[in-house]
Amino acid sequence: MQVERLKYVIWAADMGRAVNFYSQVFSGTVLKQNDIISEVSICGGVIGIHGGGEGGRTWTGLSFQVPDVIEGAAEIVAAGGQLVREPQPENGEPPHLAMCVDTEGNEIMLTRKRH
Protein backbone atom coordinates (compact mmCIF):
# COMPACT_ATOMS: atom_id res chain seq x y z
CA MET A 1 0.00 0.00 0.00
CA GLN A 2 1.31 3.41 -0.90
CA VAL A 3 0.60 5.90 1.88
CA GLU A 4 0.56 9.46 0.63
CA ARG A 5 0.05 11.22 3.93
CA LEU A 6 -0.75 10.54 7.59
CA LYS A 7 -2.75 12.84 9.83
CA TYR A 8 -4.47 12.49 13.18
CA VAL A 9 -7.97 13.97 13.39
CA ILE A 10 -9.50 15.57 16.47
CA TRP A 11 -12.85 17.36 16.98
CA ALA A 12 -13.55 21.03 17.61
CA ALA A 13 -16.68 22.91 18.64
CA ASP A 14 -14.97 26.19 17.71
CA MET A 15 -12.71 25.75 14.68
CA GLY A 16 -10.97 29.13 14.90
CA ARG A 17 -10.18 28.68 18.58
CA ALA A 18 -8.80 25.17 17.97
CA VAL A 19 -6.63 26.22 15.03
CA ASN A 20 -5.28 29.17 17.02
CA PHE A 21 -4.49 26.91 20.00
CA TYR A 22 -2.45 24.38 18.01
CA SER A 23 -0.75 26.90 15.74
CA GLN A 24 0.21 29.23 18.60
CA VAL A 25 1.05 26.87 21.47
CA PHE A 26 2.95 24.34 19.34
CA SER A 27 4.27 26.74 16.67
CA GLY A 28 2.22 24.91 14.06
CA THR A 29 1.74 25.91 10.46
CA VAL A 30 -1.85 26.17 9.26
CA LEU A 31 -2.08 24.15 6.05
CA LYS A 32 -5.83 24.43 5.52
CA GLN A 33 -8.64 26.16 7.39
CA ASN A 34 -12.39 26.18 6.94
CA ASP A 35 -15.44 25.40 9.08
CA ILE A 36 -15.47 21.68 8.21
CA ILE A 37 -11.82 20.56 8.36
CA SER A 38 -8.60 22.36 9.11
CA GLU A 39 -5.04 21.07 9.20
CA VAL A 40 -2.08 22.19 11.30
CA SER A 41 1.43 20.85 10.72
CA ILE A 42 3.51 20.45 13.87
CA CYS A 43 7.07 19.12 13.80
CA GLY A 44 6.43 17.17 10.58
CA GLY A 45 3.11 15.68 11.71
CA VAL A 46 -0.36 16.85 10.70
CA ILE A 47 -3.32 17.32 13.00
CA GLY A 48 -6.66 17.44 11.22
CA ILE A 49 -9.29 19.39 13.14
CA HIS A 50 -12.85 18.45 12.26
CA GLY A 51 -15.71 20.83 12.97
CA GLY A 52 -18.89 19.77 14.71
CA GLY A 53 -17.31 18.69 17.96
CA GLU A 54 -19.39 18.95 21.11
CA GLY A 55 -16.58 20.07 23.40
CA GLY A 56 -16.79 16.95 25.58
CA ARG A 57 -13.67 15.49 27.15
CA THR A 58 -11.98 13.01 24.77
CA TRP A 59 -8.63 11.22 25.11
CA THR A 60 -6.70 11.64 21.86
CA GLY A 61 -3.43 9.80 22.39
CA LEU A 62 -1.55 12.87 21.15
CA SER A 63 1.79 13.38 22.85
CA PHE A 64 4.07 16.36 22.32
CA GLN A 65 7.71 16.06 23.43
CA VAL A 66 8.98 19.39 24.76
CA PRO A 67 12.16 20.45 26.58
CA ASP A 68 10.33 21.48 29.77
CA VAL A 69 6.84 20.19 30.65
CA ILE A 70 6.34 22.80 33.39
CA GLU A 71 6.86 25.66 30.92
CA GLY A 72 4.82 23.84 28.28
CA ALA A 73 1.93 23.27 30.68
CA ALA A 74 1.96 26.97 31.58
CA GLU A 75 1.74 27.87 27.88
CA ILE A 76 -1.24 25.53 27.42
CA VAL A 77 -3.08 27.16 30.33
CA ALA A 78 -2.21 30.66 29.07
CA ALA A 79 -3.73 29.73 25.68
CA GLY A 80 -7.03 28.63 27.26
CA GLY A 81 -6.28 24.95 27.85
CA GLN A 82 -6.34 23.12 31.18
CA LEU A 83 -4.19 20.77 33.21
CA VAL A 84 -5.65 17.42 34.21
CA ARG A 85 -2.58 16.60 36.26
CA GLU A 86 0.14 19.00 37.32
CA PRO A 87 3.66 17.98 36.25
CA GLN A 88 5.29 16.09 39.14
CA PRO A 89 8.98 15.34 39.80
CA GLU A 90 9.80 11.65 39.66
CA ASN A 91 12.73 9.88 41.32
CA GLY A 92 14.53 13.18 41.93
CA GLU A 93 14.29 14.21 38.25
CA PRO A 94 12.35 17.13 36.79
CA PRO A 95 8.80 16.33 35.67
CA HIS A 96 8.58 14.35 32.46
CA LEU A 97 4.79 14.29 31.96
CA ALA A 98 1.90 16.77 31.98
CA MET A 99 -1.67 15.69 31.23
CA CYS A 100 -3.53 18.54 29.52
CA VAL A 101 -6.76 19.45 27.75
CA ASP A 102 -6.96 21.75 24.74
CA THR A 103 -9.63 24.43 24.29
CA GLU A 104 -12.03 21.90 22.72
CA GLY A 105 -11.91 19.19 25.41
CA ASN A 106 -9.30 17.01 23.65
CA GLU A 107 -6.90 15.44 26.17
CA ILE A 108 -3.25 15.62 25.17
CA MET A 109 0.02 15.08 26.97
CA LEU A 110 3.35 16.80 27.14
CA THR A 111 6.44 14.70 27.70
CA ARG A 112 10.10 15.44 28.28
CA LYS A 113 12.83 13.25 26.89
CA ARG A 114 14.30 11.14 29.65
CA HIS A 115 18.06 10.87 29.86
Image (cartoon, rainbow, N blue to C red):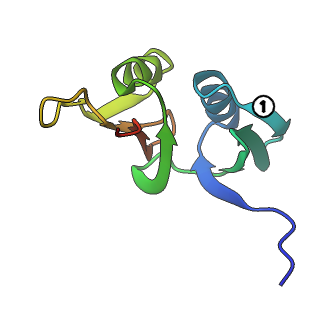
| Relative to 25, residue 45 above or below | below
**Which residue occupies the foreground of this view, 72 or 90?**
90
Q: Residues within 10 Å of mark 1 (few under 14, many from 20)?
A: some
Which quadrant, please, contains the C terminus?
Answer: top left
Is residue 94 rendered to the left or right of residue 7? left
**Which residue occupies the foreground of this view, 53 or 22?**
22
**Which residue occupies the foreground of this view, 16 or 67?**
67
| Relative to 101, residue 79 above or below | above
Is residue 98 rendered to the left or right of residue 59? left
Which quadrant, please, contains the N terminus?
Answer: bottom right
Total residue callouts? 1
**Which residue occupies the foreground of this view, 113 or 39?**
113
Residue at the location (12% across, 36% down)?
91
Is residue 15 rendered to the left or right of residue 80? right
Is residue 64 rendered to the left or right of residue 37? left
Which residue ends up furthest to the bottom in the rendered image? 1
SS at circle 1: strand
- Residue 8: which quarter of the image? bottom right
Which residue ends up furthest to the front in the rendered image? 115
Q: Tell me where residue 21 appears, x and y as whole percent.
A: 60, 28
**Residue type, numbered disc 1:** Thr
Residue at the location (41% across, 38% down)?
113
- The residue under label 1 is 29
Q: Tell me where residue 60 appears, x and y as whole percent.
A: 48, 55
| Relative to 25, residue 8 above or below | below
Q: Tell me where residue 42 appears, x and y as whole percent.
A: 69, 38
